[in-house]
Amino acid sequence: MLLPLLIAAAQPAAASDPVVIALVAGEGDRKCLPDKSLCLDLPAPAKAGEADGALVLTAPTNGDASDLPLPYSRDDGQSLNLWPYLIAVPPRDDAPADARQYLMGVVTSQTAMYSGGGGNGSRLRLLRLDTTPSNMRVGDEVLDVVWDSSLMIRACFSEQAMKDRREACHDEYNFTGTLSAGPAEAGEFPALTYRAVATAYPRTARRSQDNGGLRLKAADLVHAKDPECSYERTLRYNPATSRYEMDRPAPDCSDYTTP
């Protein structure tokens, strides 16, 4: 049976992080700022086959509401979920006093099923979000990173294999990303810290190899961290590309992240 899908929205920011703001439950499925001055919702289509609903932004304190299109859809089996955090952007010197700018997140996910296993993989995408009492606007995407994955691959094809593998008949690969405030620096957007943790079960499993003939020990039946694909990077916004960039390249972890 496929492992429970990891929901990217469940990955927390640090509790004391003043830059990455945890949203709270609002009316219905809305996610709101702690003071309820702004709420977000990404409703699914009312009926199968209908076009996606837009991002719904509401300002309950003054009754304003806006339906704003997003550059993503649920086509070809892709699912969309809100990341339940907003990243606070320092106000520009020339900005109106009542203007607020954030980065909002959308988690896009794909699922694949295959004989004896399956998996899902998702990405976190950050977009500009500008708000004033009279106008709310979703801007360009500024970040696209691997977010989480959960994969299971069948490894037992005989009774002998079941014995050799101590009935651990699926190799499991998991990847989880988190995002928090980075070093305090001057800039249009705040620096961010991206952390990734990848694990394999059993600890000897390698997706790029045939693991069916392994003889496992009891000590192998653990979720072992992959040191190469468990890493930390600082993300800084580059005005020249209008996107966040890592301070150094990330390793190729597609064995963990591609369903």
Image: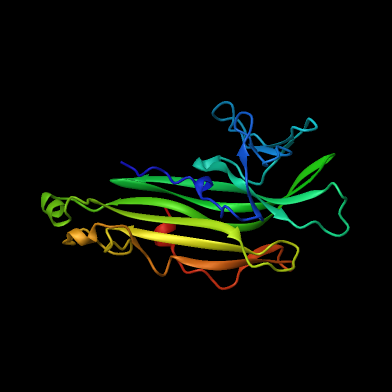
Which one is in front, 257 or 29? 29
**Vertical position of residue 112 compared to residue 63: above or below:** below
- In the current view of this chain or complex, which residue is farthest to the top? 47
**Vertical position of residue 112 compared to residue 226: above or below:** above
Q: Position of residue 154 (x, y in %)?
A: 26, 50
Residue drawn at the location 56% of the way across and 55% of the way down = 14
**Vertical position of residue 138 compared to residue 246: above or below:** above
Q: Where is residue 226 in the image (x, y as percent from the top left)?
A: 37, 65
Which one is in front, 255 or 34? 34
In the picture, measured across the screen, residue 29 lies left or right of residue 6, that is right
Q: Position of residue 133 (x, y in %)?
A: 83, 40
Q: Could you say which quadrant of the image residue 254 lies in?
A: bottom left
- In the current view of this chain or complex, which residue is farthest to the bottom? 248
In the picture, measured across the screen, residue 25 lies left or right of residue 219, that is right
In the picture, measured across the screen, residue 132 lies left or right of residue 89, that is right
Q: Could you say which quadrant of the image residue 5 lies in?
A: top left
